Image: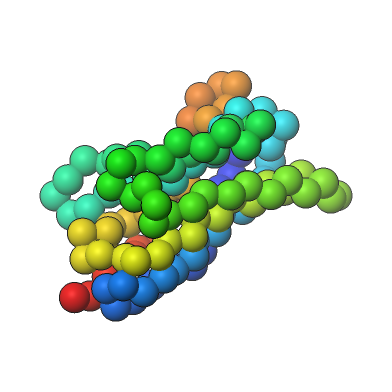
Amino acid sequence: QVQLVESGGGLVQAGGSLKLSCAASGSTFSINAMGWYRQAAGKQRELVATISRSGATNYADSVKGRFTISRDNAKNAVYLQMTSLQMTSLKPEDTAIYYCNADTYWGNDWGQGTQVTVSS
């Protein structure tokens, strides 16, 4: 199992930038891909961006050109993988809870989520 902890959410004005980070620990060797999803109030959770072990990326059309996903692998006493989501030119419609996801050998693991609020 993989444990995921997100950080970096908050309140930002439209047009501003924000960076989210997610630290994965535990059985990180089992991770195939990592990604970010978001859920706005009253809506279903939707994909924002994913990045594979090899670094291949995939973005939702609504965030292409504005968001960038990256992944850093570090080997330490415990295995740690970081994925970040750099968000620029934020819009009020980007307001949502953002969840980190790990696609592993055994299924999907999720973080607790971090709130991003974009004011107009």
Residue 74 visible, this orientation: yes
Q: Is residue 12 above or below residue 29?
A: below
Res 102 seen here: no
Q: Residue at x 73, y 46 (%)?
A: 73
Quadrant position of the N terminus in the picture: top right
Quadrant of residue 98 in the image?
Answer: bottom left
View extreme (left): residue: 42
State the image coordinates of residue 53 (x, y, percent, origin top left). Answer: 64, 32
Left or right? Give the position of 38 relative to 2.
left
What residue is shown at x 17% (from left), y 45% (from top)?
43
Q: Residue furthest right?
A: 77
How far across and down, in percent of the image, does residue 34 sit?
A: 54, 39
Q: Position of residue 14 (x, y in %)?
A: 27, 73
Q: What residue appears at the point 40 percent right and 40 percent down from the top-left corner?
A: 59
**Where does residue 106 sit, x and y in percent of width and height?**
56, 22
Relative depth, front residue between 13 and 27:
13
Q: What is the total number of numbered labels drawn onto the structure image?
A: 0
The answer to whether residue 7 is left or right of residue 114 is right
Residue ID at (48%, 30%): 108
Q: Quadrant of the C terminus?
A: bottom left
Outermost residue to the front: 65
120 lies above or below 104: below
The residue furthest top is 105
Q: How is the image coloured?
A: rainbow
